[in-house]
Image: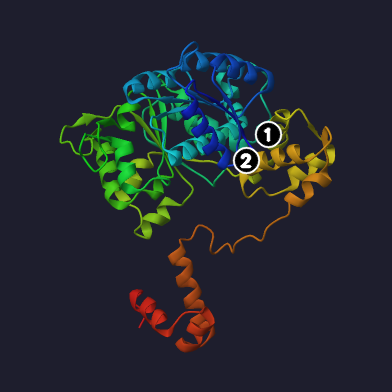
Amino acid sequence: MSRILVVDDEAILRDAVSEALRRAGHAVEAFESGRAAVDRLSAEGADLVLTDLKMAGMDGLAVLEECRRVAPEVPVVLVTAHGTVETAVGAMKRGAYDYLIKPVKLDELELLVARALEHRSLAAENEVLRARVGEGGAEPVWTEATREVYRLLERAAQSDATVLVAGESGTGKEVAARTLHRLSRRRAAPFLAVNCAALSAGLLESELFGHERGAFTGADRARKGRFELAGGGTLLLDEVSEIEPRLQAKLLRVLQERVFERVGSSQARRADVRVVATTNRDLGREVAAGAFREDLYYRLNVIPVRMPALRERRGEIPALAEHFIARHRKRLSAGAMRRLCEYAWPGNVRELANVIERAAVLSGGEEISGEVLAPWLQEAPRPSPALLGSRLDEIERKAIEENLRANGGNREKTARLLGISSRTLRDKLKRWGVA
């Protein structure tokens, strides 16, 4: 359970946001005063601070500054009115994680909070990648896989070339993107992220490019998109494989010509951003299957970065585990550490952080034993290697073709065993060109 501090001097908004976050499963403390929230953060810590921008006394910018001073690793999200968006963007240059525009939509709130908390849980990887930037402190234990990723990010940061970061979920793709931004000449400008999988095509188009007033139902005012708001900085397209084809074509034009139009406008605007895209899919396979534009793939894949899975860099598990357990003021026994190092971690760093938090919350003593961890470290059956990375339609076709062969081509028997009608089977085979 994540601990969130909500700061707003308007009781109605404060209570509504707090209740929405509690329903989403978070532990929430609400504060009318920014000073009270900062004092609580300093004394007891937190996983996220959500603060209104315009408040009497200590405003949101002052809250941000104090939070960065007492707990720089804790993400701060600002809530702002439309007229102060530029101020919120400026706050991102000073360390804010992101912002929400009033009136706050609860689905957007939950999505942004989830992304901020995920970034918080992967902060340890950021520390690993930061070691060679010269910020002081002893260099942590690195595996060669992580060293190679960092060397590649260092080289890529010297240019504005588009970067495609691929890897399994939980491997720290967004952390790599943020590290790339921090190493680049654009570090003083905003870093903005868009989760392409979480928005419908229409909402994503508006989020990326903005819209003019009256462009569609509900567009009662003009709005800048992320390509404008990230001007001079870096724009992360998270899970880029989920963008639908029409929007893929529009994105391709931006990458090729560095211009775009807001929805409902014909005025060309310049896109001065560094684009970083992430994916947990094999985009080459997606291109071959016709699910992703080949030309867009090559535009995105200028500099490919592959994030290794945690099982490929087990030597880093102890340092990551110690980082996560330190938040809870507990310690791991030698047996617990051994179990952590032996586990395959299919959910990668995110799973490691969650397991340790679960153990810290549910265990009574100061030391967590291997026996406490054991129920959560059971190896799940792994998918067949032949199916790993396959699309759902590819898996379906393989299953039907293998059953047909096993049944000597008998379609009636195959359909019965697969639990589908003979007509459905016939239609699928016809679509695949199988006589």
Quarter of the image with the N terminus is top right
Asked if residue 373 lies left or right of residue 311, the reply is: right
Quarter of the image with the C terminus is bottom left
Is residue 214 something one can see in this rendering? Answer: yes
- Residue closest to the far left: 266
Q: How is the image coloured?
A: rainbow
Name which quarter of the figure residue 127 lies in: top right
Q: Where residue 208 sits: x, y (%)?
A: 32, 37
Is disc 2 placed on a helix, strand or loop?
helix
Kind of residue at badge 2: Val
Is residue 410 something one can see in this rendering? Answer: no
Q: CA distance from mark 2 to mark 1?
A: 8 Å
Kind of residue at badge 1: Leu
Name which quarter of the figure residue 120 lies in: top right
Q: Residue at x 39, y 45 (%)?
A: 199
Q: Residue at x 38, y 32 (%)?
A: 103
Please tell me how crowded label 1 is: few (under 14), some (14-19), or many (20+) other residues with Cα within 10 Å.
many
Q: Residue at x 49, y 34 (%)?
A: 16
Asked if residue 417 lies left or right of residue 269, the reply is: right
Q: Where residue 144 sits: x, y (%)?
A: 62, 36
- Mark 2 and mark 1 in contact? Answer it, CB < 8 Å: yes
The image shows residue 321, relative to residue 66, as above or below, that is below
Residue linked to disc 2: 349
Is disc 1 placed on a helix, strand or loop?
helix
**Which of 410/425 is in front?**
425
Which comes sooner in the sequence, label 2 or label 1?
Answer: 1
- Residue closest to the far front: 12
Residue 320 tag number = 1
